[in-house]
Amino acid sequence: TNSLAMIKDHPVLGVGLGNWRFHYPRYHRRIAVDTDFNSHVQADTPHNDWVQVFAETGLIGMAGLAVFLLALAFAFSAWLGGRPEHGPPLALEDRVAVLAVMVTAIAYGVDAVFSFPMAKAAPSFVLFLMLGAAEGLAGARGVLEVRGHAAAACAQAAATLALGVLAGQAAWVLGDVHFKNGLVLYNQGRILEASEKLAQAYRFRPFDPSLAVFHGGITHELGRTDEALAINLRARNQH
């Protein structure tokens, strides 16, 4: 919600790519009090990629994004529409594959409303890999045809990557739940319980240095200096 105030103050050019987190401290109370924002924890993203793109790139960036989305919608319409000017109709199995890619793209867009898949390499990599496969099956079928064992291998590779990303996203979500619960407990002064929740979160998100730093800070408050130092050194090495 507070990001809307940032957009209002910088509507045309935004605050610059990657600069949302540096400007947000000025806005964390502008519209509503962000109870998760404190001296230990400061957000890196607004957990909404569309809002972040708007805040960082303004109307110009959103216009470019809109052009890309329209081109993508036109491509799917051409691939699935079976219009003569776009080549012969797709075979049924190819239409199903392209439809699955379209559903994945829509799911990615919906996820971006509640999370930040655009900031992560794996979801975007898999999405564009699948879009490339759809282009190979539909858009360039007159030039390159993928059939038989090659098509099966591509499908298996895409499915394996998709399952891997799904498992990673599930672990991230579970870690985020524990992280949020830990923040609530910390703000209530229940530091020991907060530390336990953050330890659970860290098991799901072992490669998140910001989470490790916060966990190390709370561990230090509990007087476990050596453990806190080990956690912070691990976070520094990961960063």
Image (cartoon, grey):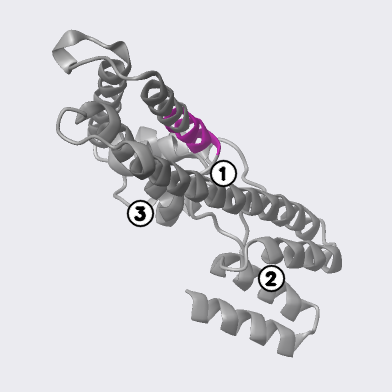
Q: Quadrant of residue 225?
A: bottom right
Q: Residue at x 77, y 60 (%)?
A: 186
Number of residues whose C-alpha sits closer than 10 Å to that of mark 1, classed few (under 14), some (14–19) or many (20 or more): some
Number of residues whose C-alpha sits closer than 10 Å to that of mark 3, classed few (under 14), some (14–19) or many (20 or more): some
The local secondary structure at tag 3 comes to loop
Q: Position of residue 107 (x, y in %)?
A: 50, 31
What is the distance, in whole Å, between disc 3 and disc 2 at their CAs? 25 Å
Q: Position of residue 213 (x, y in %)?
A: 61, 72
Q: Residue at x 41, y 35 (%)?
A: 50
What is the distance, in whole Å, between disc 1 and disc 2 at their CAs? 25 Å
> What number of labels is visible?
3
Q: Main secondary structure of the magenta part?
A: helix
Residue ID for mark 2: 215
* In the depicted structure, whether residue 119 falls above or below residue 201: above
Q: Quadrant of residue 138?
A: top left
Left or right side of 85 for 132: right
Left or right side of 10 for 46: right
| Residue type at tag 2 | His
| Residue type at tag 3 | Gly
| Residue type at tag 1 | Arg
Left or right side of 209 for 81: left
Residue span colored magenta: 105-114
- N-terminal of the pair, mark 1 or mark 2, is 1
Residue ID for mark 1: 29
Residue ID for mark 3: 18
Q: Position of residue 63 (x, y in %)?
A: 24, 29
